[in-house]
Amino acid sequence: MSEDTKDNIVAVPTARSEKPVLVSVVIPAYNEENYLPACLESIKNQDYAAEYEVIVVDNASTDNTAKIARDWGAEVVYESKRSPACARQKGAEAATGRIIAFIDADTRAPSHWLSTIVWRFFCKPEMVAVSGPYAYSDAGKFSKISSYVGGFFNIILDQLFRKVFGKGGAIWGCNFAVRRSALMEVGGFDTSIKFYGEEYELSLRLKKAGKGSIMPRLFVLTSARRLKRIGVVNQYWNWMVDYFTVLFWYKPLPEKLENWPSKAWQTLVASFSWQRARASLMYVALFFGLLWLNVSPAFEAVGRLIYVFDIGIASTLFAYHGINPRSRFYGKVCSNGDRNRLRIALTLDDGPNEPYTSQVLNILEQYRIKATFFIIGENARRHPETCRRIVAAGNVVGNHSYHHRKSLCLRRGKTVAHDIEMAHQAIYECTGLEPTLFRPPHGFRSPWLMRTVRNLGYTVVTWDNMTSDWNSEKSGEEIIQAILRRAKPGGVIVLHDGRDTRFSYDRDHMLQALPFVIETLLERGFEFVTIPELLEPEGEISA
């Protein structure tokens, strides 16, 4: 060992020393070779006169963390399960001191840190836990100020809840100490907690063993790397939600709420449309107009009839955005492609429905074009061979729900998800493909249906060109005229090779119209493409 290395050794006994120690310092570390030396140096330079042990918990590091810790004279123990709670519990089990002080590997303690902790426990025998605030050592001016302000309000808030609700005494994970006897009495750390909240959860259980205290004098400096990675807003959102969920519901920050502000912003940006923005402004104006009507002299004239008017307006708007295939008010939909290119997508709904779907496939093969089939799950299980033929011919399949119920958009999110997942599984079992496109039954949508579909990873596809060809009494000539009149570049045509889940529903008139529609559009210069091909240039979805 070199002379320089010898100078860095912490002159303290390890946990294996025969002489008992009063204080153990536990440092959980995962790939901390850049920060750990500064932390160990701050522990070495403590003004605490008695001996103490230093334990570094190597939490499955892949760098030189363990070697650095040993070079500084610390004992190294290993924990293979990656989580702060598991690492701290491992360190607590290895510690022999009656007081266990926890500090993070990227944190530096002041020289009076240990002596202040020991003094507090000595003066207050009823005290079982102490903690102190922190600030960022390597952050910008704004982040540093926010950390000071956040720490100050944290202390005030903690004291307030302790006085009002009898709760508080929360501890900071990077800077706290406990009596070993109290820690073991309450069962140690909850190792099922993956990331946030293990220290807050522990602080609530420690209240059964004694009192806790926050000491401003135990002020440490820590790295701002997580703050830089997730941002100030996310950092303090995570802290705030974690604090209150543990304080009142005894559970740490739910994983789905972690970094929620940035997730919400990303969702907002991804789903933003000028159509929705304009509609929102219009509805805000409408709301204030209705509010004025409800408080104006007109209310006295019509009485409670104004409430009927209010409900009628709200219901009409709700239905309009749920039925209009081009409305994006409830979420992003793909109703057409690039209007500057002579491309058009033919889509077929409600199949497979034999023998008609096979006849549609024969026509497509005759003209050498591809289409997108939105398949009903129940029909797919009835005609698996037809599903396989659709895919084998190079066509695209999409999910059109399992039962094709009109009321699907009004059902609970869990019911919507179950129906879509059943259809997804049926299509996968028949074709070996997992669809990424979804068309709601009848195109009906609601805010919760759109949210569920988005969470399932689907792209919602509607249309800009549909006639009532699903009605078997609609003549072939009427179908032709309606489709050709509305055909535009980038358009999405909807025809039906079935109707709901009805068995062998008559599609003769549609089959009579289909060849003429294809021939006429080809003569006009249109290129028939699938939905992924139509939308890919816009970056809507990938093939």
Image: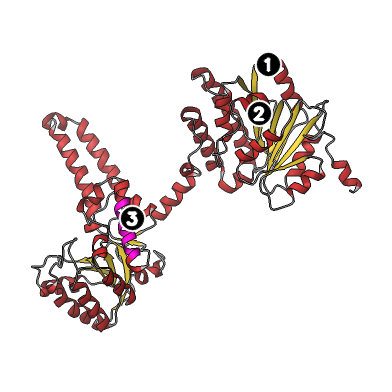
- Residue nearer the viewer, 344 or 194: 194
Residue 119: quadrant of the picture: top right
Quick check: 136 left or right of 381? right
Residue 171: quadrant of the picture: top right
Between disc 3 and disc 2, the foreground one is 3
Residue 43: quadrant of the picture: top right
Q: Residue 60, relative to residue 367: is it above or below?
A: above
> Residue visible at 74% across and 51% down?
64
- Residue nearer the viewer, 453 or 143: 453
Residue 132 bears which disc, if any?
Answer: 2
Q: Earlier in the sequence, mark 1 or mark 3?
A: 1
Residue at the extreme right of the image, as rendered = 3
- Residue nearer the viewer, 301 or 167: 167
Question: How far apart are labels 2 and 1 at the CA level?
Answer: 19 Å
Disc 3 to disc 2: CB gap under 8 Å: no
Residue 210 pos. (x, y %): 60, 19
Magenta-colored span:
418-429
Residue 125 bears which disc, if any?
Answer: 1
Q: Earlier in the sequence, mark 3 or mark 2?
A: 2
Report the amino acid beneath label 3: Glu
Quick check: 16 left or right of 145? right
SS at circle 2: loop
Q: Residue 212, relative to residue 400: is it above or below?
A: above
Q: Residue 354, relative to residue 460: is it above or below?
A: below
Residue 228 pos. (x, y %): 61, 47
Residue 421 bears which disc, if any?
Answer: 3
The quarter of the rendered structure image containing the C terminus is bottom left
* Secondary structure, magenta segment, majority class: helix
Report the amino acid beneath label 2: Gly
